[in-house]
Amino acid sequence: MKKMHSILLIFALFIISGFFDDSRSLSNHGSIEIILIMFIGGFLTAFTPCVYPLIPVTIGIISSINRENKKSPLLLSLIYASGIIITYTVLGVVAGLGSFTFGNYMGSPLFVWILFIIFFALGLSMTGFYEIQLPQSLTNRIVNIKGSGNTSVFLMGLVAGFVAAPCTGPILASALIYISTGGSPLLGGLYLFSYAAGLSIIFIVAGIFSGLLSKLPKSGRWMIVVRSIFAVAIISYALYLLNSSYGFIDLLNSMDRYHIIASILAIIGFIGGGLTREVDFSPLSHKLVKLIMVIFISIAFLSFSLSNHSEDKIEWITDYDTAINKAKNEKKPVIIDFYATWCAACKDIKNKTIPDRRIQEDAKRFIMIKLDVSSPDEKLSNIEKMYAVSGLPSIIFLDSELNEIKNLRITGFVDADDFLRRMKSVK
């Protein structure tokens, strides 16, 4: 079990740091990366305390149906998995039908706090503070769903995620909230299809090779580590959103030797049981200690991932009229960066993309305009309307005749290579 703890702790470091890689939140990763993260998240979910004990029970039922009806174990396992996948994929598509954009509301402190509270509450349940679960009467009905052969197995798969709601609920809710910000049913379906596929893998393998059940590690404290990984990831995202408006992590990173402070927080968090302490049936004081340790780990990872390692040496002009007149006189192309203090992706571009040496060099042939529209006055609002800015970030490229090259407009996070490619296209 100690070996299992060590492996999971290392894996936790990998997953959590990857979740905020290059100071980007999940919402700023490319679709392929998100699909991979969702798949890994689904696979890890199978090892949480609410799901893992279901594996031998489920495989036992599938084996019984197999003996009675002489069905293929592979077929029955795939049918069960298809039930799980269909349920989650449909939920992803429905969530993707929304067109909810964080950026349109992040200027409101009230909205930021509401969003933070939702994610923090979901993360809190993963620490063992409390459980999010369906009413017992509904759970009993789901568990007692009956059928014959393929139908029975398929129905079991359809409701599997709801039976394990205490562990899958917070993760699913977080994913659905995120997916609803994109307004893409296709991507929403793909993301949760990937999550469900990851969750189903162990059921498929165990269903085909039932002899492997005896080789699986027994349920134990190591499952708390898995659940705690999700707690740290979800709470980190909650803190990330709060930081987008209040910059408390940025304040920490502005201190001398901030990396030492962050390291100390991470060490205290790990030693204090942020990933290993089980508090489900413990007194409130023990739960509070666990929560504080999880928060320490979350702050440490955010500090490292959001740290700015490069310097922006570009000569930005903050007065629009002055900059445009300068561009006219010097016949130079223009880049206009609309940003806001609450815009997370704007900060990511500022900290990780713009400081690239190649961008800094090529920027010399442009007139670089930076406009803070956190709380726009009438003049800034008119400029936004003139360029049809509907969300942030919005980075606009004008040629030397001051005509916008619309296919180059940036409306989300882009890396340095992509940004530079757009710059090179402007003459």
Image (cartoon, rainbow, N blue to C red):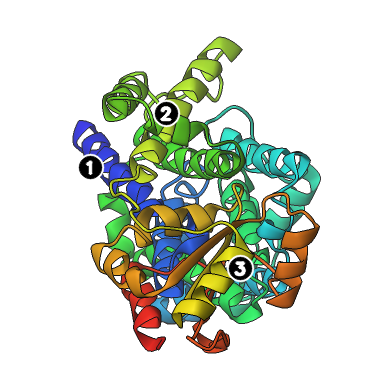
Q: Earlier in the sequence, mark 2 or mark 1?
A: 1
Label 2 close to label 1 by CB (< 8 Å):
no
Which residue matches tag 2?
252
201 up-or-down from 74: above or below: above
Tell me the crowding category of disc 2: few under 14, some 14 to 19, or many 20 or more residues within 10 angstroms, Cα based: some
Say which of 255 and 214 sits in front: 255
Quadrant placement of the N terminus: top left
- Earlier-in-chain disc, 2 versus 3: 3
* Marks 2, 3: nearer the viewer: 2
Q: Nearer the viewer, residue 174 or 25?
A: 25
Residue drawn at x 59%, y 47% as measured from the top left = 341
Above/below status of 277 relative to 339: above
Question: How far across and how far down the image is residue 295, in percent?
Answer: 48, 28
Query: Does the rendering let one see residue 400?
Result: yes
Query: Mark 3 highlights which residue?
Result: 88
In the rendering, which numbered label is found on residue 7? 1
Apparent side of residue 167 relative to residue 296 in the rendered image (left or right): right
Amino acid of disc 3:
Tyr
Question: Of callouts 3 and 1, which one flags the residue occurring earlier in the amino acid sequence?
Answer: 1
Residue 151 image offset from top left, x and y in percent: 64, 77
Q: Judging from the image, what secondary structure is the residue with disc 3 in?
A: helix
CA gap between label 2 and label 3 equals 39 Å
Which amino acid lies under the numbered mark 2 shown in the image of this protein?
Leu
| Element assignment for label 1 | helix
Q: Quadrant of residue 21?
A: bottom left
353 is higher (above) or lower (below) than 68: above
In this picture, residue 279 sits left or right of residue 338:
left
Q: Which amino acid, mark 1?
A: Ile
Q: Residue 59: where, in percent of width, then height?
A: 45, 61
Circles 3, 1 touching at the beta carbon (< 8 Å): no
